[in-house]
């Protein structure tokens, strides 16, 4: 049975709830739905699963966009209620007829709801009975059709490929051509270790169980023989040549340099014997306000192009009349052309395909049923809705002021710990040094912790940054437990009065289970204040896989009932992507974590904040 059914406005005012359902809900599924789906433009799915201690709920919802109403139904996930969608549709229709924006109580809707619920349940029971009656008949028809298909296809194979295709007519045919739930046939099912076969291969006389074309094999053999013969003949005639060494280039007739290694001298204990000067490259870009150029000219050009496209499809009079009079209600068919063009535009900006599709579905759900205002076009309405959605997604939902959090931790007498995580080669150590430089400019004592005990040269790289910035570094070498190294580094920072500990970790792929276990242990043991995921701005669809699996592995391998996940994102190599800024949107959408830093160069000052307005304009340009 249903656990709860609510009707509320988009502003959060609850208009009606079913008084029959007196069951106390575990957790806060409605609040989580609003935060995680409705406010983050994930409403296109119209279904959400919520897990609480001792209960698992499924929430379904629908909108009345013209009136600004939200209808939410909640039930136990194990029940699989079939009538919920029909019930929501009927409740939406009936409630919209009695809705008055000035009213806040609708007690008379209780009786109407009881009738709608009984009607929806009876419909579901009838559908269930009809499916049970029709199911055996459909299965028999599917099996007969599957046998006929397999018989014709395998018969052709036996004629063409002879004895080699004899395995195809065996037990493997029991699994081919079986009917699926939707009535279609699955001809690619793999059974008894057989590889799936394609129809084209069968027509060409090649069976899917290892058969091959003899003519092609003979041609390959003859080519191989010719190549070996020519190689032997050439080898007998010509003697092996000596390896030519590359000579140093001489510039302007200057004497040649015999020294090629210009690295600094190093003592036996690994300390370089040079005078170190603190790196001072000026003010960090984090403290500079980014100026956005006006793009009114480009927007006017786009409006003109859109007008040209629409005038081709419609006559001048009809389009003018529609823009003046306005359309009654927007339907899905009206939105599809504009949404398809918008999805393609987002994907060209490097937004992951899955994310672009979900965004368009969410925008369609928010616009469907709304009345189109006068002197407005569908494309401009869709673009405005998408712009609002993008700004809402990219704007952080919590404070990302690290300086304030650092001072708060300092007042409590403990260091502020930041852990940098990510895949291989994205620039964790380099951008860790940029963050350290920015903190030093704000008179904050910083210490580095070299917890990348896996990659060769990682400790030396971090040591070089620490020497240039003249800040302490805690290191224990290689092949050590990074969780223990980080714990000792935090203890050392407490003793020497460091305000911030920046923990460098090894780069790891999201599918590397041993390294992901080690990372989960490091975060669980040390409970850092901030877990930063360092990701490239160059990635497209892989951004979804990286972040979702990082969060999943951190949750799976953590012994804590409330595991610590990624808190923020540091986006690197932003200066190499031109207008392909979609990775920022993909990462924020899939993780819900804000972009806290953007790396845009090789020097210590090349670190800045994410400008949401600039990103949104670039995505929709």
Image (spheres, helix red, strand yellow):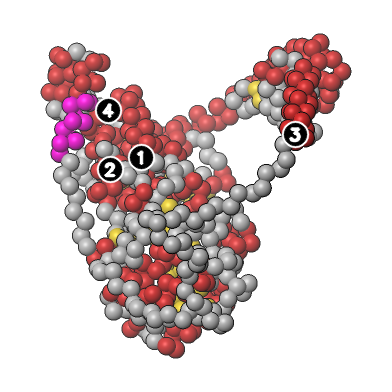
Whether 213 is among the magenta residues is no
Q: Quadrant of residue 66?
A: top left
Q: Residue at x 31, y 43 (%)?
A: 579
Q: Residue at x 35, y 52 (%)?
A: 574
Callout 4: helix, strand or loop?
loop
Whether 298 is among the magenta residues is yes
In this view, the mark in front (1 or 3):
3
Q: Do the residues bearing badges 2 and 1 touch, measured as CB atoms within 8 Å?
A: yes
In this view, the mark in front (4 or 1):
1
Disc assigned to residue 503: none
Q: CA distance from mark 4 to mark 2?
A: 27 Å
Q: Earlier in the sequence, mark 4 or mark 1?
A: 4
List the residue tagged with mark 3: 237
Total numbered labels placed on residues in the image: 4
Q: Earlier in the sequence, mark 2 or mark 3?
A: 3
Q: Earlier in the sequence, mark 2 or mark 1?
A: 1
Callout 3: helix, strand or loop?
helix
Label 3 CA crowd tier, 10 Å (few <14, some 14–19, many 20+):
few
Q: Is residue 11 visible?
A: no
Q: Earlier in the sequence, mark 4 or mark 2?
A: 4
Frontmost residue, 68 versus 351: 351
Frontmost residue, 60 versus 187: 187
Q: Which residues are magenta?
A: 296-306
Label 4 CA crowd tier, 10 Å (few <14, some 14–19, many 20+):
some
Q: CA distance from mark 4 to mark 3?
A: 81 Å
């Amino acid at each position: 049975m249903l656990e709860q059914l609510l009707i509320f406005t988009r502003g959060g005012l609850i208009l009606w709830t079913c008084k029959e359902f007196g069951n106390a809900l575990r957790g806060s599924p409605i609040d989580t739905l609003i935060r995680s789906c409705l406010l983050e433009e994930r409403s296109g799915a119209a279904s959400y699963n919520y897990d609480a201690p001792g209960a698992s709920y499924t929430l379904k919802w629908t909108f009345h966009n013209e009136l600004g109403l939200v209808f939410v139904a909640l039930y136990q996930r194990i029940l699989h209620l079939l009538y919920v969608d029909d019930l929501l549709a009927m409740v939406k229709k009936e409630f919209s007829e009695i809705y008055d924006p000035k009213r806040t109580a609708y007690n008379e809707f209780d009786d109407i709801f009881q009738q709608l619920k009984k009607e929806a349940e009876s419909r579901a029971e009838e559908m269930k009975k009809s499916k049970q009656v029709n199911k055996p008949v459909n299965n028999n028809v599917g099996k007969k059709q599957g046998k006929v298909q397999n018989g014709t296809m395998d018969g052709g194979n036996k004629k063409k490929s002879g004895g080699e295709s004899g395995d195809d007519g065996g037990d493997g045919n029991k699994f081919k051509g079986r009917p699926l739930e939707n009535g279609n046939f699955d001809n690619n099912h793999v059974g008894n270790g057989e590889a799936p076969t394609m129809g084209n291969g069968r027509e060409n006389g090649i069976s899917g169980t290892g058969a091959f074309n003899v003519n092609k094999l003979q041609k390959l053999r003859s080519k191989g023989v010719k190549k070996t013969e020519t190689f032997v003949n050439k080898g007998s005639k010509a003697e092996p040549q000596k390896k030519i060494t590359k000579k140093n280039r001489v510039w302007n007739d200057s004497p040649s340099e015999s020294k090629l290694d210009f690295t600094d001298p190093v003592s036996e204990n690994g300390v370089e014997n040079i005078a170190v000067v603190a790196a001072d490259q000026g003010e960090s870009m984090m403290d500079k306000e980014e100026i956005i150029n006006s793009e009114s000219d480009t927007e006017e050009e786009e409006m003109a192009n859109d007008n040209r496209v629409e005038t081709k499809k419609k006559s001048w009079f009809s389009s003018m009349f529609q823009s003046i009079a306005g359309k009654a209600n927007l339907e899905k068919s009206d939105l599809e052309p504009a949404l398809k063009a918008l999805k393609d535009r987002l994907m060209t900006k490097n937004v992951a395909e899955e994310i672009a599709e979900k965004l368009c579905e969410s925008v369609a759900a928010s616009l469907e049923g709304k009345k189109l205002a006068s002197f407005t076009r569908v494309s401009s309405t869709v673009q405005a809705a998408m712009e609002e959605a993008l700004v809402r997604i990219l704007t952080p939902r919590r404070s990302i002021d690290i300086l304030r959090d650092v001072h708060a931790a300092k007042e409590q007498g403990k260091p502020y710990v930041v852990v940098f995580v990510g895949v291989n080669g994205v620039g964790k150590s380099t951008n860790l040094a940029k963050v350290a430089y920015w903190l030093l400019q704000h008179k904050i004592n910083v210490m580095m912790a070299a917890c990348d005990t896996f990659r060769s040269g990682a400790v030396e790289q971090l040591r070089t940054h620490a020497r240039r910035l003249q800040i302490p570094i805690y290191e224990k070498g290689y092949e050590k437990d990074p969780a223990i190294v980080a714990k000792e580094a935090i203890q050392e920072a407490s003793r020497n009065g460091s305000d911030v500990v920046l923990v460098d970790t090894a780069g790891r792929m999201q599918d590397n289970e041993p390294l992901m276990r080690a990372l989960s242990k490091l975060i669980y043991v040390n409970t850092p204040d901030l877990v930063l995921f360092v990701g490239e701005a160059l990635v497209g669809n892989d951004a979804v896989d990286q972040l979702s699996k990082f969060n999943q592995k951190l949750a799976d391998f953590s012994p804590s009932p409330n595991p610590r996940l990624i808190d923020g994102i540091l986006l690197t190599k932003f200066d190499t992507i031109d207008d392909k800024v979609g990775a920022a949107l993909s990462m924020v959408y899939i993780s819900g974590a804000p972009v806290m830093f953007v790396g845009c160069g090789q020097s210590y000052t090349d670190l800045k904040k994410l400008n949401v307005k600039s990103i949104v304009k670039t995505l929709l340009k």
